[in-house]
Image (cartoon, coloured by chain):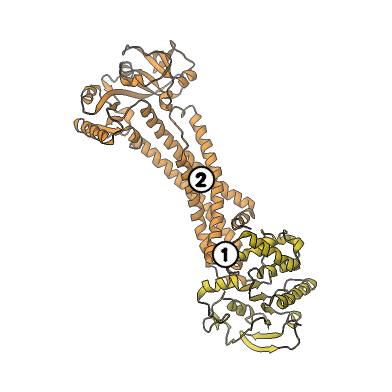
Chain colours: A orange, B yellow
Amino acid sequence: MKFGILPVRNITRRPIRSALTAAGIAVAIASFVALTGMSRALEGAWVRSLVERDTHLMGLRKGAVEILTTTLDENLTGPMKQVSGVKDVAGELVDLVTLPTGQAVLMTGWPAGSFLWQTLPLRDGRVPAADDERWVVIGEPMAAHLGVGVGDTVSIRGAPFTVAAISRPKAVLNRHALVAPLRAMQRLLDRPGRVTVFNVRLERPDDPAAVAGARAQLSAMFPDVTFTESGAVAQQNEILGMLRAVAWGTSTIALLMGLMAVLNTLLMAVTERSREIALLSAMGWPQARVLWLILLEGLVLALVGSGVGAALGLGALQGISRHPSMRAFLEIQVGPRVIWEVVAAGVALGGLGGLYPAWRAVRQPPAEVLQRE
Amino acid sequence: MFEAGLVKALGDVTLTIGHQELVAVLGASGSGKSTLLHVLCGLLAPTSGRVVFEGMVPAGQRAWARLRATRIGFVFQSIHLLPTLTALENVQVPMFGVITRETDRITRAAGLLERVGLRDRMRHLPGQLSGGERQRAAIARSLANTPTLVLADEPTGNLDSASAAGVLDLFTELHATEGVTLVVITHDLDVARRCRRLVRLADGRLVSDTVVEGAGS
């Protein structure tokens, strides 16, 4: 018999209680995976969208919390292009719009001839040169959702926009976005001469010193604008930061409840088995081995619950990402980080949940327990 | 020698048990028999006095735990086999940390169970064994690490007379063949009659220590 058999047999001794405890852990881990995964999927969608557009720095109004409601002067584009190390700059006006189907999507306006258009892979149609007409390039899944093709008309905020092209970007945010010419977008939102953000392309984006240098110059020359590297833009966004905090806060509460489940189960098990534990001491088991046995029981319970919880959480995340109101904004990626976090959470739940019961188990005087016979 | 709160459970007990002796400790309930047993194996530390084991005074709980793991076997009245483990697995429990290889543990446990007449019951859980069989398995477990001393606390207390006789035969045989020192705490005069030396306790004190010629043979 291997040592590992002992905790497994002890757990299966009370199968319903153990299963319920594992279920409690599974729910805690599922909440953790789904909530933090959703927060990351939102951030990931934004970052990948910028990477796909070849934007190296993003310029936002300084101090802006909700960026869609703030604007900057479009005329800053020219002076920004003059900064050393900057290859190109394109202003962009962005807002959320509701489609005739009721789905909310991002709509963005790009200046005619800007580098942004070159990053948009088209499936059908072409990008017209006219900057002030109401036309729109629509992502493939949105076109399918609306049932429209090139030449059809889509009503946006009551104004008819002709579908000029169907795009096929990879990033989920770009795939579900509507892209219109900047002038038409400014008219639609009644924000003439204004943009929401500046997309900055650099000469040497792979050289950290060059990136830092360009960023420092831009920041010095345009004090009302905050320039952030694309990879960090989601991390530094206040709203996403709040969502992240809510996700972690809620997950922590769920994990604490899972911890209580492990603690309660093992405490009951240790109390029930006090004579057996005393017997192990009488047979010469050192305290460390008894402690390890109880801790292992907690770890096995927690890891089983974590495995089930991770599967449930990822399933829930997939379900959320397919929901019509969310599919345009979530880019789910399951990497080694999620696996490590689930394993770490499982080990923490099992270890911490088992620690006190294990300590109680080794603290009981074996002679006293055995004499209770 | 030992005080628990205001209760003096044992006092003025000086006892030397020789190698391969078969000793019965007799006394009424509350006379201090179990306390003496627990003091003998280091589960209880005396508040004054000392316990010398094979010429040494073990220093602290760790040393005693090591001795209990390697040199001292235990048999209890309530048997205490772990209910989720088979007889074969129960006998292996004391071997963790002493016998490293799993195959060696299994071989040793199987040999001991065969020795106590449970060859065909090795894969049974305690709940599937009779009281006598369970106590035999517990005796096999007490011998797991080839102890020099086996302490038995009322080993036939929960058995019917036939099973008790079988267990006593086994104890006597093991004492004769394995050469272990056997200390049996008992109320049972049948058990006492098989022992050559009888130690009597009353109110935590040693009241008699006699050698009975011809007993235990």
The quadrant in which the C terminus of chain A is found is: bottom right
**Extreme-top residue of the structure:** A151
Q: Judge whether residue A371 can be spotted in this image.
A: no
How many numbered marks are there?
2
**Which residue in the protein does label 2 denote?**
A28
Helix, strand or loop at label 2? It is helix
The residue at the point 73 percent across, 71 percent down is B158
The residue at the point 42 percent across, 44 percent down is A249
- How packed mark 1 is, by other alpha carbons closer than 10 Å (few <14, some 14-19, many 20 or more), is some
Helix, strand or loop at label 1? It is loop
**Which residue in the protein does label 1 denote?**
B97
Q: Mark 2 is on which residue type? A: Ala
Relative to B31, A132 lies left or right: left
Q: Are marks 1 and 2 on the same chain?
A: no
The quadrant in which the N terminus of chain A is found is: bottom right
Which chain is disc 2 placed on? A
Tell which of A358 and B213 is nearer to you: B213
Residue B81 pos. (x, y %): 67, 64
Question: Distance of mark 1 from mark 2, alpha carbons?
Answer: 36 Å
